[in-house]
Image: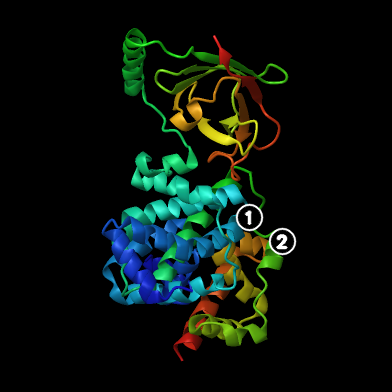
Amino acid sequence: MTSRDEIETLLGQVAGGDRGAFRRLYAAMAPRLYGLALRILRDEMLAQDILEQVFLGVWKDAGQYRGALAAPETWLVTITRDAAIARLGAERAAGRIAGPLDITERLYATRPDIEDLAGMREEARALETCLRKLPRARADMLRHAYLYGATYDDLSKSAGTSKNALRAAVRTDLVQLRECLSR
Amino acid sequence: MNARLDTELPGGAEAGAAEYSLGLMPKAEIAAFEAQLAVDTDLQQDVAAWTEYFASFTDMIPAETPPPQVLRRIEGQVFGAEERRPVWRQVLPYLVGALAGAVIVWAVLTSGLLEPQAPALGADLMGPEGELALSARFAPATGVLTVTLQQGGAGDGRVLELWLLPEAGAPVSLALLRSPEMLVAIPPAIASDLDGARLVVSEEQPGGSPDGRPSGDPRAEGVLAAQ
């Protein structure tokens, strides 16, 4: 994997219009971002569209990246995730993709095994460790929201509870999660 | 941040930052939250921290190599048409615009007056059911193949791709037929061999064939012959 510093340097060069750096950045990051878009959208054409959209945006907006607030990979992952989730929402609204909580997604959203934790980077390990202190079903809801764009409406329907009660419970979880992560 | 909601819901702005980063914040609350975010550095730090943590949900997702045409499409858009592909290696003809078309007409007329030329070649490309029909005309003086759609077209979200099928060797992609009339510049290396050449039109995904070969059965085909 390309290091954080390398990606950051490449982003800086891309912001300056360096085409070689753009190709190197693509080579370093496109497989991860395409894998992510493909997982969210589960459609190669849609995922390719997202990758195209993300890298066109990177060429235009690499100068917007602020290293103080996010790791460069996180910035790219977040842009890709947001674009893929927005597209998923549009496809669902148009009835071209099924709802967010079908059985396949339940399978995909399974949490990592306990033995996987050791191999994770620090943030991932801390998050997984703290998520395990929450009720399992609600910890999985956070994954569903991030990876599949599930809304409180979707989640409360699936859980059979009222939206307000669920939101209050999730927000309480998030405060608990934050406390756990700050330790 | 909507103060009224914060007093009703547990967690306050801290939980709001997490909801925002997760994409769980209801749409109606986002604008107010972002207005607060723009001026509140603590909140920015919170959102940044959550973003970093939640992005780690994606760490376990396997990387997948995107097909090469995605980078070609991206580079075509960011670097401009001149770098879209190495022309002589990929044999992708550049697509000549209307203005260039006028110049070519002039070139045909002038060169026709100055020296004898090989005869023009033409082909009618027909689909098996006649639902798709195109005509192609090659002017040796200019090396330009003019392809005109007579009838039919690509399916929704699809594109027609024109191929040259040599008697031996791999198919050569000549152009994506995105408009009813296309002018395709044929590289000199293959322009001399076009008499009797087989042209095929396939239907492809929007970026063209993913594997450099026509997909599926030909939608139309024909053979170039002297006219």
Residue B188 image offset from top left, x and y in percent: 44, 29
Say what secondary structure mark 2 lies in: helix
Whole-number angstrom distance, CA of label 2 to CA of label 1: 11 Å
Q: Nearer the viewer, residue A132 or B217?
A: B217
Residue B205 higher or lower than A67, as above or below: above
- Mark 2 — residue? A104
Say what secondary structure mark 1 lies in: loop
Image point 66% across, 38% down: which residue?
B215
Q: Amino acid at mark 1?
A: Arg
Image point 50% across, 30% down: which residue?
B190
Residue A60 image offset from top left, x and y in percent: 32, 53
Image point 69% across, 16% down: which residue?
B130
> Which image quadrant is residue A117 in?
bottom right
Residue B9 image offset from top left, x and y in percent: 48, 72
Image quarter where the N terminus of chain B lies is: bottom left
Q: Are marks 2 and 1 in contact (CB under 8 Å)?
A: yes
Q: Nearer the viewer, residue A155 or A18?
A: A18
**Which residue is most to the front?**
B116
Q: Chain of mark 2?
A: A
The answer to whether residue B155 shows anywhere in this view is no
- Mark 1 — residue? A42
